[in-house]
Amino acid sequence: MPQLTRHQMGSTLLDALRAEGLGVRDLFEGRQEPLSWFFRGVAYDQSELDILESGAVDELHAPSALVELAVDEMALGMANVGLEGTTSYLVHEPEAGETSSAPDRVEPDEVRFSGEALLGVLNIDVAPPPLWLEEREADPETNEELADRLSEMAQEIGSGTDFVEVHIEGAMSSREGWGQLSGASVQPSGVSVHFSLDIPMAGTGERELGDLFEAGASTAAGAVEGMREVFR
């Protein structure tokens, strides 16, 4: 298996997003203890990102995709050194009653990487701009319609992903007052659609990683356009 590095993975992901016409800003990377590294950025349609970066922020009201790559650094190291390198850290534990003072080394042909172990996860959260939510009517019927359309879009776009979720929070209209809950208007807020793609540890090389990131970028681009259609 070729060596995979965090930098290479981040670069491959950005290339895949650019190939789908998405530009990324606010790039950030960091580490979550004990062994998780993450890389994230906010993706827009490239033409809309050009507007944003020109300084005309007030003119930009477009859906965006928060793209996060989370990598298990232990799995990454084990994948890079392979079974032979990984087993060099392991020995057979003597069973009760054995007198051997020198535990035998675990041989590579005695173990294999679990098919359930993940190298990492690619998470994509696509959301509309706040203005689109503020302009919507705050009544149960339109809220239900919004939820249905978001669900249909998410399931269609995310059919090739490992996890799909629609998230909608509700904000009580200040005109109703907290004491008048019955029939109160609820404004949808915190709206997003979430997709996750698992990155298997076993069998993932440079080509497989590129294919997975292309699928993720296609999902992000499709969901950005899908979000536009839902609110159109």
Image (cartoon, rainbow, N blue to C red):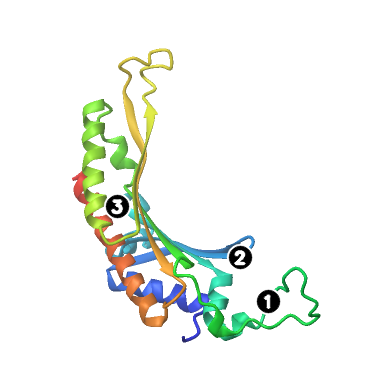
Which marked residue is nearer to the observer: mark 1 or mark 3?
Answer: 1
Q: Which one is earlier in the sequence, the residue at label 1 or at label 3? A: 3
* Mark 2 closeness class: few <14, some 14–19, many ≥20 residues within 10 Å: few
Circle 2: element type: loop
CB within 8 Å, label 1 to label 2:
no
Residue at label 3?
Answer: 62
Residue 40 placement (x, y as % from top left): 47, 62
Residue type, numbered disc 3 = Ala
- Residue 35's disc number: 2
- 181 displayed left or right of 118: left
Three-letter code for the amino acid on which mark 2 is drawn: Leu
Q: Which residue is drawn at 44% across and 63% down?
A: 121
- 165 vs 94: above or below: above
Of the image marks 2 and 3, the number of the one nearer the N terminus:
2
Q: Residue at x 31, y 52 (%)?
A: 63
Label 1 vs label 3: CA separation? 57 Å
Q: Assign a secondary structure to mark 1.
A: loop
Q: On the rendered image, what quadrant is the C terminus found in?
A: top left
Q: Would you say 62 lies left or right of 108 here?
A: left
Residue 57 x %, y %: 37, 53
Which is more foreground, mark 1 or mark 2? 1
Mark linked to residue 113 = none
For disc 1, the marked residue is 92
Q: Quadrant of residue 133?
A: top left
First in sequence: mark 1 vs mark 2: 2
> Mark 2 against mark 3, which lies toward the viewer?
2
Cα distance in 3D space between marks 1 and 2:
25 Å
